[in-house]
C-alpha cells in the first residue's frame, strides 16, 4: 500500500494520472460523449441538474454516470488508503455561493478547466481565451491569498456528515438504473433525458461509470487538480500538479490525433462559441471562484468523496448554479453568450471580489 | 524550543502558504507543522523539500499529523 501511496504522490504518479484522464476523456468522445467533452465536470453537473428537473433546457438533460463514478471512486480510494475523514464547517454558505458562481462563469465559457484543456487538445482555438481567463482568475485568487484570505478551519465531525454526499450519489445512481433512457422519449419515470443536442450524446452507462470510477480512484490518490496546478505554479513556482495538467493536455491531443478527432479552428467547434472576450471573462469568474474555494470542480468531487462536507456544499452550489444559468438565460450556447450572460459575469466578479476582500480572518 | 504552525482544518493552499512563509524567515533550525489531512501532509513536505528542509519526523496522532521539519 505504501508503495502505491508513494507512487501517486510522486511526479511520475501525477503525470500518469494526467495521461490516463487525457486518454480516457478523448476516448469517451469516440465512445459517444459530445465533441471535446469527453469529461467536463461543469457541463456534466449541468446535465445532471437537467436530468432531475432543476432546469428544463431540453438539450442538456442526462444523469452523467462519470460524475457519480468520480465521487464513488474517490470514496473507495479514501477508504482503501484510510483517508476517509468526515469534516465540515468552513464557511458553507460561502462555498455554496462560490460553487454557483463557478458554474455560472464556466457556462459562459462552456466548460470547466478540464474541458478547456480537452477543447484545446481537440483543436478548438477558443479554448485559448478560456485558459487565459482561468489563469487570470486564479492569479487574482493568489493576490487574495497573499492578503490573508481564507475560509476558516474545518472541523472533524460525525461519520454521517462524510457519508451523506456519497449516499446522495448512490441514490442518483439508483435512479439512473431504475429509470433508464427510453429511445426518443424525454422522460423516463422521474428522470429527464435529451433526445437531441449534447445531452443526447453519451457513451454507454457501463463505460461511463467505469471510467468515472477509475478516474475518481486515481485522482483522489494523486490529488489531481487543475486549479491547484496553476495556483501552485503562480504562488509557489511548484510544477508538481501542473505537470499532471500538462500530461492531460498532451495525452488528449495525441489520442485525438490517433482517432482523427483533432480539428483545428475557431468557428464551428463543438459546443463552443467564438466570443473571445466572454470566453475569457467567463473563465476569470470560474477560475477565481475555484481558487477561493480551494479546488477545481473535479477536485471538489473527489474531496466530497473522501468525506469533505464543505466540498459537497460547493458541488451542490454548482448544481444550483447550473439551474440558475439555464433558467435565467445566463448560459452561453454555440450562438454566443446568453441574454443575461454578460450581466452575470459582471455581478459574479463583484461578489467574488467582495468575498475575497472581506474573508481575511486571522487563522493563528 | 521549535516553533509550531497549526494548519489543522485549513484548506489548500493555506498550510503550504503558512509553512513557506515561516521557512523563508528561518535560515535553519526546526519547525513543527500540524496538519489534519494526507493532502496537506504531502503538500507541506513537498514544499519544505523544495526549500531544502527535510522531514525529521512524521508522526500520525489520531487523524492528524505532526511534521517536524529541519535544516542544518
Image (cartoon, rainbow, N blue to C red):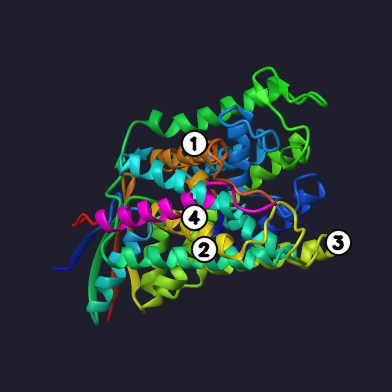
- Which residue lies most toward the left here? B1
Q: Mark 2, mark 3: which one is toward the viewer? A: 2
Tag 3 subunit: A
Give the image location of residue A194, x and y in percent. 73, 33
Q: Mark 4, mark 3: which one is toward the viewer? A: 4
Give the image location of residue A4, x and y in percent. 57, 56
> Going from the N terminus, do you reach mark 1 or mark 2 first?
2
> Going from the N terminus, do you reach mark 4 or mark 3 first?
3
Circle on res. A320: 1
Per the image, label 2 sits on a secondary structure element best described as helix
Nearest the eye: A248 or A189 = A189
Nearest the eye: A195 or A93 = A195
Q: Magenta-highlighted stretch: main secondary structure?
A: helix
Which residue corresponds to mark 4? A286
Distance CA(mark 1)–CA(mark 3): 36 Å
* Number of disc labels: 4
Relative to A11, is A190 above or below? above
Q: Quadrant of residue B33?
A: bottom left
Nearest the eye: A149 or B6 = A149
Q: Decide: marks 4, 2 in contact (CB < 8 A)?
A: yes
Which residue corresponds to mark 2? A134
Please tell me which residue is depicted at 64% across the width and 53% down the height of the picture: A336
Tag 4 subunit: A
Residue A171 appears in view: yes
Q: Quadrant of residue A278?
A: bottom right
Circle on res. A260: 3
Quarter holding the C terminus of chain A is: bottom left
Distance CA(mark 4)–CA(mark 1): 15 Å
> Going from the N terminus, do you reach mark 4 or mark 1 first?
4
Q: Is residue A356 left or right of residue A313?
A: left
Distance CA(mark 2)–CA(mark 3): 28 Å
- Which residue lies most toward the top here? A189
Amino acid at each position: 500500500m505504501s508503495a502505491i501511496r508513494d507512487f501517486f504522490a510522486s511526479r511520475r504518479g501525477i503525470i500518469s494520472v494526467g495521461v490516463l484522464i487525457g486518454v480516457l476523456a478523448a476516448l469517451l468522445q469516440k465512445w459517444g460523449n459530445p465533441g471535446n467533452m469527453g469529461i467536463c465536470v461543469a457541463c456534466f453537473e449541468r446535465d445532471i441538474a437537467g436530468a432531475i428537473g432543476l432546469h428544463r433546457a431540453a438539450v442538456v438533460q442526462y444523469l452523467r454516470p462519470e460524475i457519480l463514478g468520480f465521487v464513488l471512486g474517490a470514496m473507495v480510494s479514501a477508504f482503501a488508503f484510510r483517508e476517509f475523514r468526515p469534516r465540515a464547517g468552513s464557511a458553507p454558505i460561502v462555498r455554496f455561493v462560490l460553487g454557483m458562481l463557478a458554474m455560472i462563469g464556466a457556462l459562459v465559457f462552456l466548460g470547466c478547466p478540464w474541458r478547456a484543456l480537452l477543447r484545446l487538445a481537440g483543436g478548438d482555438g477558443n479554448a485559448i481565451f478560456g485558459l487565459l481567463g482561468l489563469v487570470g482568475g486564479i492569479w487574482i485568487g493568489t493576490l487574495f491569498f497573499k492578503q490573508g484570505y481564507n475560509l476558516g478551519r474545518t472541523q472533524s465531525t460525525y461519520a454521517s456528515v462524510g457519508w451523506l454526499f456519497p449516499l446522495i450519489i448512490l441514490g442518483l445512481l439508483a435512479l439512473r438504473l431504475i429509470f433508464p433512457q427510453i429511445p426518443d422519449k424525454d422522460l423516463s419515470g422521474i428522470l429527464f433525458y435529451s433526445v437531441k443536442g449534447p445531452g443526447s450524446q453519451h457513451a454507454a452507462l457501463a463505460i461511463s461509470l467505469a471510467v468515472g470510477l477509475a478516474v475518481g480512484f486515481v485522482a483522489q490518490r494523486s490529488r489531481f487538480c487543475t486549479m491547484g496546478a496553476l495556483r501552485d505554479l503562480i504562488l509557489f513556482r511548484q510544477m508538481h500538479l501542473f505537470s499532471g495538467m500538462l500530461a492531460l493536455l498532451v495525452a488528449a491531443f495525441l489520442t485525438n490525433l490517433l482517432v482523427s478527432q483533432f480539428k483545428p479552428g475557431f468557428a464551428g467547434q463543438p459546443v463552443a462559441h467564438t466570443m473571445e472576450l466572454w470566453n475569457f471573462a467567463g473563465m476569470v469568474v470560474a477560475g477565481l471562484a475555484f481558487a477561493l474555494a480551494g479546488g477545481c470542480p473535479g477536485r471538489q468531487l473527489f474531496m466530497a468523496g473522501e468525506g469533505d462536507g464543505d466540498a459537497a456544499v460547493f458541488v451542490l452550489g454548482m448544481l444550483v448554479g447550473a439551474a440558475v444559468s439555464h433558467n435565467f438565460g445566463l448560459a452561453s450556447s454555440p450562438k454566443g453568450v446568453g441574454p443575461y450572460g454578460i450581466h452575470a459575469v459582471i455581478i459574479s466578479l463583484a461578489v467574488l471580489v467582495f468575498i475575497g476582500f472581506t474573508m481575511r480572518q486571522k487563522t493563528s | 524550543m521549535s516553533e509550531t504552525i497549526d494548519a489543522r482544518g485549513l484548506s489548500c493552499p493555506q498550510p503550504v502558504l503558512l509553512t513557506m512563509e515561516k521557512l523563508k524567515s528561518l535560515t535553519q533550525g526546526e519547525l513543527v507543522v500540524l496538519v489534519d489531512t494526507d493532502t496537506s501532509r504531502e503538500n507541506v513536505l513537498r514544499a519544505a523539500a523544495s526549500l531544502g528542509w527535510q522531514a525529521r519526523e512524521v508522526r500520525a496522532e489520531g487523524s492528524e499529523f505532526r511534521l517536524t521539519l529541519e535544516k542544518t
